[in-house]
Every structure is written in C-alpha cells, then in structure tokens.
Amino acid sequence: MYAYYTKLKEPEITPIKAGFLFLLCATWLLTGLIGHDPWKPDEAYGFGLIYHIIQSHDWIVPTLAGDPYLDKPPLYYWTAALFAKAFAPVLPLHDGARLATGFYTALTLLFVGLTGRELFGNNRGWPAAITLIGCLGMLLHAHEILTDNTLLTGCAMMLYGYALSLRRAKLAGVFIGIGLGIGFMSKGVVAPMLFLLISIGLLLFRNWRTRAYFTTLGIALLCALPWLIVWPWLLFQRSPDLFIEWAWTRNIGRWFDYVRSGNFREVFYYLKALPWMAWPAAPLAAWTVWEARKRMVQEAEFQLLLTSFIVMLLVLSFVPDINDQNGLPMLLPISLLATAALSTVRRGAANALDWFGIMTFALLAIALWWGWAGLLLDNNAKITHWLKDYQPGFDPAFYAIPFWIAVSFTVLWIVLVWRVGRSVRRSLINWAIGVTLLWVLVMTLWLPWLDTGKSYRHMVDDLKANLPQKYNCIAGVRIGDSQLAMLQYFGDINTRTKATRVCDLLLVQGNRIAKPIEDEIGWDKIWEGGRKGDQNERFRLYQRVGQ
C-alpha cells in the first residue's frame, strides 16, 4: 500500500533515536496520571463508579452512590478498579485508577504507530505516534479518568486491522473484532456504528471488494461476539429492567429521541473544534489530501483514512452529547494523514511550523514560570492578583522535588531545541517536546493550584467536620453525579434523594443565591461551603427544626 512512499528518501530511525522517542512518549504519557484528586466533572463521577466496584465487588451493574448508573458499559471501570486495587499499597485509589488511562493510551499510541508503518512504510510508525501526542486535544483528556480513552484504543485497533486486511486478512479480522469489542464495552453503540459504516464505505472502492476483505469482516464479527454478548447477557440475568434501561433508555432510544427532537445546533461543533484539537496535525493532513488528490481514488491508504474520518465526523456529530472527548477518535485518521506529509511538505513550511512551535512554547513556559514565581513571592503583578482571585483558597508553598523536575525539563528542552535540526519530522518532534514541557510544568509547578480549585476534598472534609454527632440520614436535593461520588469517596457520606420527609438533615447544592427548599417543614441552616476555587457552586446543610 505504500509503494509511493518507498520511493521517497526517509531517514532511518536508529536505536538511539528510537530510545529517545520512547522516552518522550513515556514522559508525556506518565506525567499527570498520579498526584491529584479526581477533578470535576468527568473524573469525579467516573471514579465514583470505579469506587463502587472496589467497595462492593459488583462487576455487573455500574453504580454511583447507591443508584444504578447505566450510561456506559463497564470495561474501563473494570480495568481501573483492577489497577486501583493492584497499586493500593503504594498509591491512593484514584491515582491507581488513573493508571488505567495510561494503559489504554499506551495501547492507542502502539496501534497508531503500527498503522502508520503498515500504511506508509517502516519509518512512519514513530512519527505517527509523535504526531498524535502533539495534538492539543489529546493533552488533558488522555490523562483523565474517561471511558473515551478506551473507545480511542478500540478505534486505533480497528484502524490497524483495516490497514492490515489487504496483507493478512485473518489476523486483521482478529484486531478489528477485538477493537470493536473494546469500543462497544466502553461507549456502547458508537463503536458498532463506526465499524458498520466504515466497512460499508470501503466497499465503494475496488481495492476493498475482495474475498480477503469479506473474510476479514467475518472473522472480526466472530471475535467481537463475546464482547457484544457476555456483559449484556449478565446484565439481563441480573435485572431485565436494568438491561432495558441501558440498551434503550440510555443508548438506542436516546439517539432516536435526539433525532426526533430536531435540535441539531451543535452538529457543526467538530468542524470548529478540530482545527485546535488536531493542531498541528490538521494542516499537515489537509496538505496530504491536497498533494495526493489525484491518487485518492487508487490508493488504499487514503481510501481507508478518509472514509474513517468522514464516518467518524458524521456519527460523532449526531451523538446526543457532543463534547471534545467524544471527538478524540477523529484524531487518529488526521494524525495518520499528517504522517504521510513528512516527505512532501515544503521546507519553508516545515521551518515556519518549527519556529512557531519554538516561540509559542518558549513564551508559554516563561509565562508559567513567571506566574508561579509571582504566586510564591506574592508580588503585585496583575496576573498574580488574577490568579489569587481565581483560586482564593490557594496557599502557595515551595516543593523542592517538583521544582527541580520542572527546572530539569526546562533546561533539557532548551538543549534539545538547540541541537535538533530543521525538517518536517523534526518540527513534529520539537512540537511534541514542547507540549510535553508545558505539561510537565503544569503538573509540577501548578498542580497544587489546579487541585485546589478542581478537587472536592477540602469541601467534603469541612462538611464532615460540621455534621451533628448523631443523625438519622441525609437527604439530597439537586446534587450532581460528580458531587455524589466525591461525597461518598472523601467523606463516606451517602445522601438519599426524595427523602426530605424521612431524614433529619438536608444537603442542597445550588449557587450563590439560595433557592427555596422544596419542603413544607422548616429547616435551620447549620453549614454552607463549596470548593475553594468555585465562587458560584455552593452546598448548604440544613437540620430539621426541633431536632
């Protein structure tokens, strides 16, 4: 499939270079996985589901604060619970659970690299992985407790299977089937829809209308069947009602309701978000498409990547919940298309990208160091006052180990930028190094500041300290999923919905302006608080009058 690219001169990746690229990927991957609490919103409720598995050993029904939560199948939650329990002797449960994200992201990088090598030649594996870690949309979400990282891994495996299918049909079917199963067990019907539409779309091209391709699809379906059947069957055996809630109310029926509503205001969301999510891969991918426009119809690699991207864009633009993390699978074909541009982009454009990256990361690194020093020294700069106002509960302190890690990576970045030459390949490496530098600075110097505003630990500790010594139960009003999970994890506090007539305490979530309590019996407010960095979200604890 890569006959055109074998004619172009490609530098060999020596063992030393391969070792450096591996360390770069490992540094980017491991930084930020440990050392902070579950952050609002997605990490908090996601860890709540994981915490239930750890506490109850119920692996069938995802449960949040005592109530079934069947929004997604539980593969990611299973994996995270296993990691959390395995590393419990040395790491907090939430840090151990976040290692599951690192596991799936590592698999994603592996299969993206294998796909790049399969499509474009032996020297295109590492560049494909480096291009993906350089995408801005990957930086935060690839280090969070998110089931979307499992879907991303499944899609990467499917793409590799499709790329391999024209050479090794049977093995390709195994990879596609496992990837389909992983995707289904992470996000439900999204992965089967992608598999169905990509498989049909490729049949429009002669290269894919072969017996070997149909053999691949047949094997893929056989390998996917256990993933598609076992957990749904176990859920049905546990409770037919819960199965219907998952299969229809939370998945298929929700899609139909969304389509019937006709509310498609966000249908073009990814067309606006992808230019920054996929930067700098997006312009390189666009150049690849333009440069190879005359070969698109004949060459299978472009047929696969363009078909995959179009299908992903259409399917993901019509899901009921549209957000950045749902769009992560589209970064895979974009990064692979960008990899194809390494030998065709003009040197002037490569140098421009390189200098843009160097100047951007240099300025951002200076800003991060300056802002951190301003907070620590308590100077009177405007940015220091703004940072204090944004996180009013933050108390700056000097931590030696994070400081020296940040200094070391800053010096190393300067040396690498000075030593690395100019080319498209090196500009992508420099960009990935710059992204990694900023991520290291944020996760060392700025982690305490971020954790103050994004964690519920201090708020829950304060609430627990103000609870009466004796009470029957706590009723909850308007408490979100993330908050329910963190109340249980940090404080072992379980609220009961629709129990205001039974419980003698009432916890209400709201904003700065207190809303009326929906109960005719009087309550006395005995506590009010919230996260240190959030001036709008407030929690109020009431005690029944006369108790």
Image: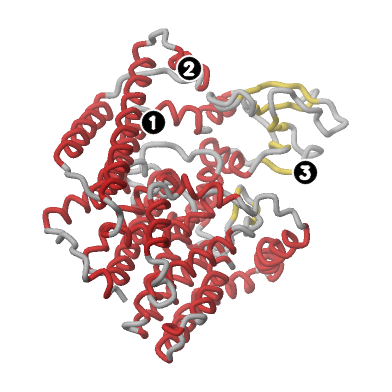
Q: Report helix, strand or loop for mark 1.
A: helix
- Left or right, residue 527 beside residue 282: right
Give amino acid for label 1. Answer: Leu
Task: From the top left corner, tell me how far across and down residue 546 is, in percent.
Answer: 80, 23
- Asked if the residue under mark 1 is in contact with the one under mark 2, i.e. CB atoms within 8 Å, the reply is no
Label drawn at residue 447: 1
Which of 278/215 is in front?
278
Kindly identify which residue carries mark 3: 498
- Identify the mark nearer the N-term, 3 or 1: 1
- Disc nearest the viewer among 3 and 1: 1
Kindly identify which residue carries mark 2: 388
- Left or right, residue 239 beside residue 489: right
Q: Residues within 10 Å of mark 2 (few under 14, many from 20)?
A: some
Which of 187/474 is in front?
187
Q: Report helix, strand or loop for mark 2.
A: helix
What's the residue at 26%, 26% (across, down)? 403
Does residue 93 show up?
no
- Asked if the residue under mark 1 is in contact with the one under mark 3, i.e. CB atoms within 8 Å, the reply is no
- Disc nearest the viewer among 2 and 3: 2
